[in-house]
Image (cartoon, rainbow, N blue to C red):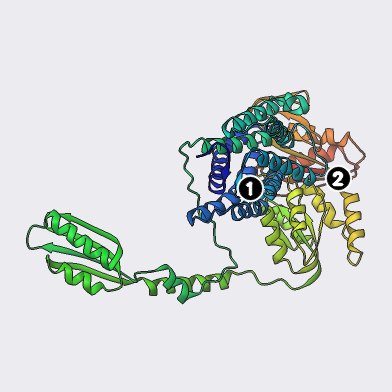
Amino acid sequence: MSNLTVDSALMAKMFLAGAKNLEAKKEWINDLNVFPVPDGDTGTNMTMTIMSAAKDVASLCSTNDTDMMTICKAISSGSLKGARGNSGVILSQLLRGFCKTVRDYDSLDIKILAEASTKGVETAYKAVMKPKEGTILTVAKGISEKAVELSENGCEDLEYFFSEVIKYGDEVLEKTPDMLPVLKQAGVVDSGGQGLMQVLKGAYDAFLGKEIDLNFQAPKASNNDKPNFEVQANAEIKFGYCTEFIIMTNKQFNVKMEIDFKEFLESIGDSIVCVADDDVVKVHVHTNDPGLAIQRGLKYGQLSSIKIDNMRLEHEEKLFKQEQLESLTKEPEMEHKDVAFIAVSVGDGINEIFKSLGVDYIIEGGQTMNPSTEDMLNAIEKVNADTIYILPNNKNIIMAANQAKSMTEDKDIIVIPTKTVPQGITAVINYVEGMNPQDNAATMECEIKNVSTGQITYAVRDTMIDDKEIHQGDYMGIGDAGILSVGTDELKTSFEMIDEMMSLGEYEIISIYYGSDVTEENANKLADMVREKYSDCDVDIQYGGQPIYYYIVSCE
């Protein structure tokens, strides 16, 4: 291997190794979440983003289809569709910008790699409305600046180049707490930046020739791929009859006989098992002529337990049954509408609330699992409407929604930047039928600004945030701008959170959505406490059924 350039095959191997390393470290990266909540998901989001591309790249490698343009297309499109959460979307944009530069070259030297890293950073920064330093963007920018510096200084040794870039990337990562006070207070570095460094370190291991398991699960077939029974059966099954029998030998079945018999079976089929035990030989073979296998077996003794299955017929029957099942369970095509709503939601109660308000399609996800850009695109495809409003209901999903919007050409997509479930509910309530779509969007965006949201969950580690000492297992009330309450009593901590929320503005409506881990009795106790203190407000309590978060509360 030359130390001057990286060819397409090596680049593919380095990308896969980077994805594998990120996957192996994802839980550790999740634990770097600033807020010590049980749904820290940066590592998961970045892993699912890169794995979407890695599976495509692995498929190409298995067929030796590894020219630079093909590999780059797989990385770019795969990560784009699989992007989840802000960190995943930013990672997909870094990869997209990088691939735009390198796809036109057969091999990559340090100058090209430096240019590509710069392009990746430019692309990622453009994708973020308000770039914030001390994040994955800062780490990526530091890496690209170091790459350019080494290139301009005449560096030609790739091993030295990669090691210095990674070393500097780690240095920038360690400085992220100095750029974001919330990181310093929590005692962690930026989780997205750490995820990016793990991708680079895995790629560097592959460059150095270290042994890495690069096996990836094959991508799932699309639901749009309709099976052709006859073609698929014959294409996938080379030998049609599964043939099994036992030979009760009438003489010693020696090693030479076993070798000769196996060679014969290999000449007429595959999937061969031939196990001899004293005077009994167990035989299994897939073949197009079972008679030949049986006839040769008789040469060694009497046969018993003969079984022959037509695998092509069984395969066709299985596919037919699968097609029937799919036709029975397939969602009926939606009636065409001028306007429709897609909402991201989690919890059977909250899902029903959105549906009752006229939301046409629910994407399962949110705090505990951010939907990908592809999830958004699939929902858009299924919703039969000219204009579609998307309610992300989580600040970490808005970028994926906007990315899906940019990839949709045949429908007018309007993303309402709802950051919480209560904002999403308020947005759809304020939709006015018959009003111009843009005017409706402006009204909804204005109204969601009047919604204050609080959520109760528990701490997964000890930390200090917003001058509040938090211990593992404590209940936490998290508001729009930070921690509002901390305690060891669920009801008391929840009430204190609502108290803090009410002190921040003049509100008339308090809505409480209780989760799957809360009893109706406790939820009603909380509502009664709130009604007693805030008797001038309408206090509404509903079952949300959401996991992780005991209560979601809105004040309007």
Residue 49, disc: 1
Residue closest to the eye, 178 or 278: 178
Residue 421, disc: none
Residue 94 appears in which quarter of the rendering?
A: top right
Q: Secondary structure at mark 2?
A: loop
Mark 2–mark 1 distance (CA, rounded to whole Å): 31 Å
Residue 459 appears in which quarter of the rendering?
A: top right
Q: Which residue is mark 2?
A: 451
Left of 297 or right of it: where is 421? Answer: right
> In the image, residue 225 lies at what x, y percent?
57, 68
Q: Are marks 2 and 1 in contact (CB under 8 Å)?
A: no
> In the image, residue 449 lies at what x, y percent?
88, 45
> In the image, residue 173 lies at what x, y percent?
69, 29
Residue closest to the eye, 65 or 285: 65
The residue shown at (22%, 74%) is: 291
Residue 541 visible in the displayed image: no
Question: Within 10 angstroms of label 1, few (less than 14), some, or many (20 or more) residues?
Answer: many
Q: Amino acid at mark 1?
A: Thr
Question: Within 10 angstroms of label 2, few (less than 14), some, or many (20 or more) residues?
Answer: many
Residue 57 visible in the displayed image: yes
Q: Amino acid at mark 2?
A: Val
For the view shown, which residue lies furthest in the front direction?
154
- Circle 2 or circle 1, nearest the eye: 1
Residue 382 appears in which quarter of the rendering?
A: bottom right
Quadrant where the C terminus sits is top right
Q: Give the mark nearest the N terminus, 2 or 1.
A: 1
Residue closest to the eye, 471 or 502: 471
Note whether 45 is above or below 278 in the view shown. Answer: above
The residue shown at (38%, 73%) is: 312
Residue closest to the eye, 235 or 361: 235
Q: Secondary structure at mark 1?
A: helix
